[in-house]
Amino acid sequence: MTKVVIIGGGWAGCAAAITAKKAGADVHLYERTDMLLGLGNVGGIMRNNGRYTAAEESILLGAHELFQITDECSRHKNISFPGHQHASLYDVNIIEPRVTRFIRSLGINLYLQHRIIDVEMTGQKITGVKLQNKEIVEGDIFIETTGSTGPMGNCLKYGNGCAMCILRCPSFGPRVSLNQKAGVEDILGQRANGSFGAFSGSCKLNKDSLSEEIVKELNEKGVYILSIPKEDITFDKLDMKVCQQYALKEYAENLILLDTGHAKLMAPFYPLEKLRRFKGFENVRYEDPYAGGLGNSIRYLSIAPRSNTMKVNSLDNLLCAGEKAGLFVGHTEAIVTGSLAGHNSVRVSLGMPLLELPRILASGDLIAHANEEILKKEGLKRRYTFAGSDYFKRMKELNLYTTDSDAIRIKLERINLLNIYQDKLI
Amino acid sequence: MNIEGDRCIDAGSDYCPCYLAEMNSCITCSRLKGKEYCDCNWRGVCIYQEFHFLNQSKKNVRESKEARIVSREFLGKNIIIFTLEVPHGLARQLKQPGSYIFIRNKNLESFFDMPISIMDVEDFKNQIKIAVEIHGVKTQAIKGVDDSLIIRGPYWNGLFGLENLKKTKKQKCLVIARGIAQAPAILTIRQLLHNENTVDVIIDRASTNINIISEYTNVNVLEDNINLYNKEGKEKLSYFLSTGGYSLIFIGGSDYLQKNLFDTYNSYNLKVVLTNNNELCCGEGICGACIVYDADGIPIRSCKTQIDYKE
């Protein structure tokens, strides 16, 4: 049986594990911290704008499991906030154990607190990966979903230093770029001003530290918006954000809170003292990052060059997904790319032609478009997400955006890809 | 035997970042080694961030200070056990196995500094004990000293395999010590006992004719005067290993001894702790005296770097 080793247990790694398992592989998922989902533990926004289309596409392609969990764990469904329609917000406080239990129930071998630090190679083939304790984990196919965030040196060099985020590098050790260890150099994303990396776009406030009135509105509506006095408005922060779909004027002029179990503040960071001047925020404190008044994690410093099948260039048996695979933003994007990588891992092992999602699907177009753009200087400064910014505009122009599941089903039936991820290949 | 090493013993300590960070030669941090990306394996607060907090400079280095000699005990012709009075903080910092300091005659220049393992610490009395075997230029220079010595420390990389040593709990352990290397074995034994291990000891007195382990610790001595260089000694060791059910072995003695015994213990899948016998001169990774090379020819500064031995 093909042994697929997945490195990184975020949304992309979990999605890859599921599709690889369904395709018949013996799947081993390695995660360096004590929790799956990585930044998904502090995220929560699903199905906003074009992500709705992408979620439905994935479900109909046969990767429905994680979307079912995020739907079931949603605190709010079909809500709107500036620039965004029909969003769901999953509860970050309940989702991770759900996913962990589900992954284990499938018979996927899960190794928490197992950090991979190096690769073993023969020619262009990876034969094994090395754990922190120097043990070697052998495998047939490897999928790298280690993300692009941190470690601390990057957050200092390109940000404001370690802000103590959910990734907890000092406790669990740094992320290691395995494609780089295998001799394939990382691509680095840039900001509008040309500097490298980008700040994570939101921070999480402890909901109990907000006034009753704000908590009530968040619980009922999922959104709370407070306008910022003119003298305090800064537009600079919009440029430094990862999440260009939230880099809108409204996000500089207002404090926008979303209810994901915490109060998700749609700004990369905000000085605590300033924040406490707002009505209802007098006692506010940060939940993630702990030093959210100072900075946030820095991302996009470690992208592997890949094909549209998610296979890493120049290596025989390494695939990638999630932020490792491009300037992608969001859980949906991670699950979409992860599902494809997991499925293709089994195809690689069997010597089958690899699946490339056609560009008449938003998922296929995003994967291919991001790959074209990353070769351009200006393209390195953009982010690619179904949820907004340039790519959502493109989705609408190309008529890829729809909330009509039946239309997507018909499309998939026509191209014979309905439930392809359900196929057991081995 | 191949070696590899990437863990600096000083990383995250009061002495990190050090001169090596300032000189773009940090053992741990890729950025402080001149690289444009993060590629470290350090699990702790970022050294690069610490360096940044210090305005791109190192922390204070260890300084030499005078330490009063509380007592001297002569064992045989050539061995002196010094009891020194040191600041309380230093005594505490020297309590871990593998600790060493530099000592010299206060009337001589700093190039008389020599590294000496800490044998024992009584931190509530602010006293440390060291055992010095008189046999070379630097040791000759302190033979007659009875009032005070210049000391510099704390240094910690006197043993390789410290992680093995610290993580072993409630196991059977075998300590092998030859001659003056019984001195670093004492703190090792204390650590093992602290972790509720049982410790058996084999002593090769060599030319020293001493058994200080029995004097300072209460452990089961299997042999107190074996010759590990002859066939009979190795056979006895083989016997103890095959019947003892050990999970950790400590070998205190020269590289020659360590290599000589390698084949005897290697098949038992033991965690290994070895004394660091390299020439330590400055202790700060600067002078290069302690450099050894891994299989790729990469230099390892062994005064600060934990080394793993591989077949």
Image (spheres, coloured by chain):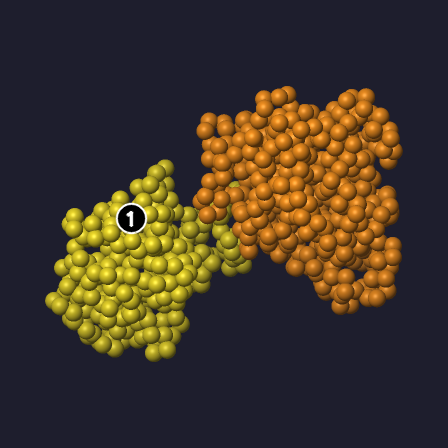
Chain colours: A orange, B yellow
Which quarter of the picture shows residue A408? Answer: top right
Q: Position of residue B293 (x, y in %)?
A: 33, 42
| Count of labels in the image | 1
What residue is at 85 percent from the left and 48 percent from the top?
A77
Say which element carries label 1: helix
Callout 1 crowding tier (Cα within 10 Å): few <14, some 14–19, many ≥20: some
Q: Quadrant of the N terminus of chain A?
A: top right
Q: Position of residue B85 (x, y in %)?
A: 30, 75
Tell which of B289 and B302 is nearer to you: B302
Q: Quadrant of the C terminus of chain A?
A: top right
Q: Position of residue A383 (x, y in %)?
A: 71, 38
Is A37 drawn above or below residue B64 in the view shown? above
Q: Position of residue B120 (x, y in %)?
A: 30, 69
Q: Name the subunit of mark 1.
A: B
What residue is at 77 percent from the left and 42 percent from the top?
A68
- Name the side, left or right, on which B265 lies relative to A285: left
Is B278 drawn above or below residue B122 in the view shown? above
Residue B166 seen in this snapshot: no
- Name the side, left or right, on which B179 lies relative to A330: left
Tell which of A190 and A193 is nearer to you: A190
Residue A416 seen in this snapshot: yes
Q: Which residue is mark 1?
A: B265
| Farthest residue, direction front | B243
Tell which of B30 and A61 is nearer to you: A61
Amino acid found under the numbered disc labelled 1? Tyr
Which quarter of the picture shows residue A227? Answer: bottom right
What residue is at 68 percent from the left and 31 percent from the top?
A340
What residue is at 87 percent from the left and 33 percent from the top?
A404
- Name the side, left or right, on which A280 lies relative to A150: right
